Image: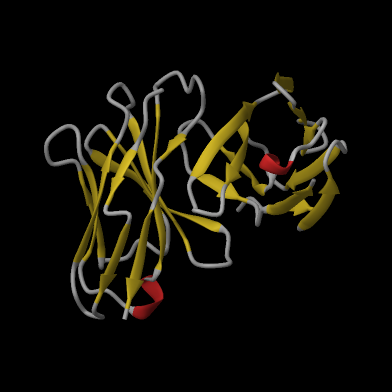
Amino acid sequence: KNEVEQSPQNLTAQEGEFITINCSYSVGISALHWLQQHPGGGIVSLFMLSSGKKKHGRLIATINIQEKHSSLHITASHPRDSAVYICAVGTSYGKLTFGQGTILTVHP
Amino acid sequence: EPEVTQTPSHQVTQMGQEVILRCVPISNHLYFYWYRQILGQKVEFLVSFYNNEISEKSEIFDDQFSVERPDGSNFTLKIRSTKLEDSAMYFCASIARGRENGYTFGSGTRLTVV
């Protein structure tokens, strides 16, 4: 059974700050996903990673397969980035195992 | 951008009643999933569905739960006799064969059992 741990659980930042959210998992995987959940509850997929690094706008996701660790970075944070960020891991087409989420609040 | 559509967005039901949650996955996706999130808790896997049959299910997915793809487009989750502890947000998700772009999640159905 894969255990997925995220840190921190809560994160408060000022607009413009660089933000890092970490994710560790216990068992080898085929892919790691970073997801965003807004207060209304909907889940949006941000990244799917199996190795290396991906960038989309101000978001950067990295993964170290050997260390079973991934980070999500947000550069120049903005209040609209406020949401819950969730790490989830899985095997090919199999179920995802989710972390507990990181609640990010960015103040203007 | 293609979406996974879930209906209803919110359903309130009496304990013991049957509910059917509906999902329309993206048309060229082949793998379908139901997840649930009890308020304040992690998202949990319920069931995966491929080629018109269940490919994996969790311990939560007991005999009270069933899934169907009745007409090649809709994907439904039925709870036969709801319990108070079934109150949660239920998410449908789908993914294409090549996994390009990762999973697409629906906006969820909030089920409240009273």
Q: Look at the image and tell me whether residue A8 can be seen.
A: no
Vertical position of residue A48 compared to residue A12: above or below: above
**Image coordinates for residue B8, horizontal then vertical, percent:** 27, 54
Vertical position of residue A86 compared to residue B43: above or below: above
- Camera-side residue: B14 or B49? B14
Vertical position of residue A69 compared to residue B109: above or below: above
**Image coordinates for residue B64, horizontal then vertical, percent:** 25, 68
Figure colour scheme: secondary structure
- Camera-side residue: A53 or A3? A53
Quadrant the N terminus of chain B occupies: top left
Q: In the image, A30: left or right of B37?
A: right
**Residue sitting at 16 percent across and 32 percent down?**
B72
**Image coordinates for residue A11, horizontal then vertical, percent:** 80, 53
Q: In the image, A105: left or right of A13?
A: left
**Residue sitting at 49 percent across and 66 percent down?**
B38
Toward the left, the furthest residue is B71
Q: In the image, B99: left or right of B56?
A: right
Numbered circles on residues, count:
0
Q: In the image, B13: left or right of A61?
A: left
- Camera-side residue: A10 or A71? A10
Identify the image quadrant of residue B83: bottom left
**Residue sitting at 22 percent across and 74 percent down?**
B81
Q: Look at the image and tell me whether residue B77 can be seen.
A: yes
- Camera-side residue: B25 or B48? B25
Quadrant the C terminus of chain B occupies: bottom left
Identify the image quadrant of residue A16: top right
**Residue sitting at 57 percent across and 65 percent down?**
B41
Identify the image quadrant of residue A62: top right
